[in-house]
Image (cartoon, helix red, strand yellow):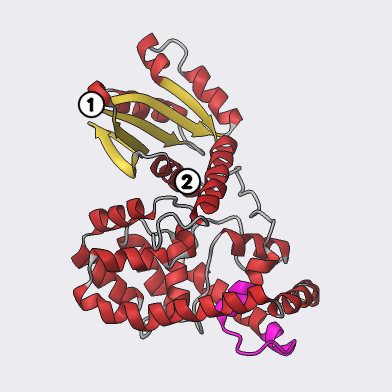
Amino acid sequence: MSVTLSPGQKKQVNAQIQPFLAYLETEASRGDEEDRLRRIRYFREELPARLKNLSEADVAEMVSQLWASRIWGNKQYLVQKVIEDNGLDSLRDELRHLLDRTVSPPARYERALLRIRRLGPASVTEILCYSDADNCGIWNERARAAVGKLGLGGFVSPEKYMLTGSEYSTFNSLLRVIGKELGAAGIPDVDLLKVDFFLYNVGAGETPPTPRGGFDHDEIRDLIESIGAMLGFDAQTEVVVAHGAKVDVVWRARIGNLGTVTYVFEVHKAGSIDSLVLNLQKAKSGPTVQKVIAVSDQEQLNKIEAETDGLPEEFRRSLAFWRVTEVQEVGEHLRLASESINRLGLVPGI
């Protein structure tokens, strides 16, 4: 998709350049620039050199370099899951492909999302950007918020948690156009990581627009997984918990004499409520499943609750309802708590 800013969009972008220029004169900016160069050096030079003999320590170092992992109070949990869910051999091969600058960014992006478990769009595009900042941008919550604030949603929707490869290509083209505006304003050495710094400042204090239908299914699914992990559960997505019952998220834990207990979450945005309820009933038949939780907006939850009238009392007692807005609030509070604790530096490097 060709990207050309309208006069109004150029005005919106240029209105944000002056505050960004002021930021570039600060001590914080100089520290951020050093951090930027360190991450570029790591993903362009150090990580590729380590791939042949990739170790768990190398994976831990890679994860610790990502802003996308800052929500995790215990990054070692994420490291362990990345290794367990992918295996070091497969992870080595996929990282080699992800860092291969002879392959187009959209192709690398799509393959990584398909083949590297536990790394979502924010992590994947961050790795792409650090390793190939001339061609790849970062698609995360702050960038989405900035795209919405600047009125650029006609090029790529800020409502989307996960872009397609084609949409990611358009996003990168949009960043190059914004970069030209930054260069015209006298900002030197503008690449797509510098544009990301600009978007980060534009999006400060903003949230991405609410998707049509109220929420993005995959974003909420992954957030529930993150919340469970931060609370100390073994959390996974897309799990078969009983015959014929594949569910969005599972939290597992060992609790004293009870042994393993399992909590099941199904995120419902659209489609058959009958099928959702049937899947939850099948899931409840799993030997360790204690609770099944339906996750949606209030209107859908009311319909789900009404649909369960007349079902066995045992199932209804095991069924709980969680509003998407509550999930988002819990995730944000845990993120802030995690960032505050991380600043204490209690566990250096992780």
Residue located at (23% from left, 26% from top): 259
Q: Which residues are magenta?
A: 180-197
What's under tag 2, amino acid-wise?
A: Leu
Q: Count neighbours of disc 1 (C-alpha within 10 A) and say few if under 14, some if 14 to 19, many if 20 or more.
A: few
Q: Quadrant of residue 123?
A: bottom left
Res. 257 in view: yes
Q: Position of residue 312 (x, y in %)?
A: 37, 11
Residue 191 is covered by the magenta coloring: yes
Res. 1 in view: no
- Report the disc number at residue 259: 1
For the stretch drawn in magenta, the main secondary structure is helix
Q: Residue 306 versus residue 298: which sits nearer the camera?
A: 298
Q: Label 2, on which residue?
A: 223
Rendered view: 119 above or below 264: below
Q: Position of residue 11 (x, y in %)?
A: 80, 75
Rendered view: 201 above or below 330: below
Disc 1 to disc 2, C-alpha distance: 26 Å
Rendered view: 149 above or below 235: below
Secondary structure of residue under mark 2: helix
Residue located at (67% from left, 86% from top): 180
Residue located at (37% from left, 73% from top): 108
- Direction from residue 261 to residue 25 in the image, left or right: right
Q: Residue 253 versus residue 321: which sits nearer the camera?
A: 253
Q: Are marks 1 and 2 in contact (CB under 8 Å)?
A: no
Secondary structure of residue under mark 1: loop
